[in-house]
Image (cartoon, grey):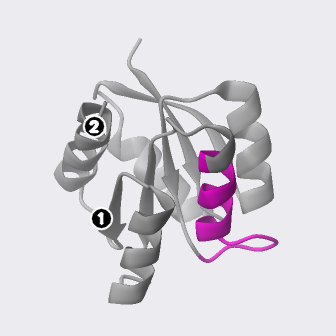
Amino acid sequence: MGKSVLIVDDSIFIYESIKEMLLDSSFQVIGHAKSGETAMELYDELQPDLVTMDIVMPDMNGLESARNILERYPNAKILMISSLAYEDTIREAEEIGTCGFLSKPIERDTLIEALGQCLEED
């Protein structure tokens, strides 16, 4: 079994795209959350190796959710994936402690490489 991944994105299209990109890779999708609040609940339950996190979502945005997960689990590996690739947003994600930031749209090779780099940070 590969490294487990929780996908957090309110778009079913993005979820399905990331899931398909990870087929036949060393990563296995084990869950999907459509909001930051659900992401925190699923992280507690599933304890994934990695999380892909969108920023713009209902209830709680991805930056706030990432901050909350990392406060509870300092070793969590969270890769931000968003169309909000502005300098201040990327800087905030880094300050929170996420392991990377990809700008949408993403490509398979870029995604797999970024997830691999997150795991190398240990």
Point out residue 48 in the picture as x, y percentages from the top left corner.
56, 29
The residue segment tinted magenta is 56-70
Identity of the amino acid at label 2? Glu
Direction from residue 67 to residue 53 in the image, left or right: left
Residue extending farthest top: 1
Residue 33 tag number = none
Closer to viewer: mark 2 or mark 1: 2
Density class for disc 1 (Cα within 10 Å; few <14, some 14-19, many ≥20) is some
Which residue is identified by label 2? 121
Would you say residue 25 sits in the magenta stretch?
no
- The relative height of residue 6 versus residue 14 in the rendered view (above or below) is above
Question: Residue at position x 76%, y 28% from top?
Answer: 45
Q: Foreground residue, 93 or 24? A: 93
Q: Does the magenta stretch include residue 60?
A: yes
Q: What element carries label 2?
A: loop
Q: In this view, does 112 lie above or below 89?
A: above
Residue at x 63%, y 27% (from the top left corner): 47
Q: Which of the pair 13/70 is nearer the observer?
A: 70
Mark 1 or mark 2, which is nearer the start of the sequence?
1
Q: Name the residue under label 1.
A: 106
Q: Is residue 35 visible?
A: no
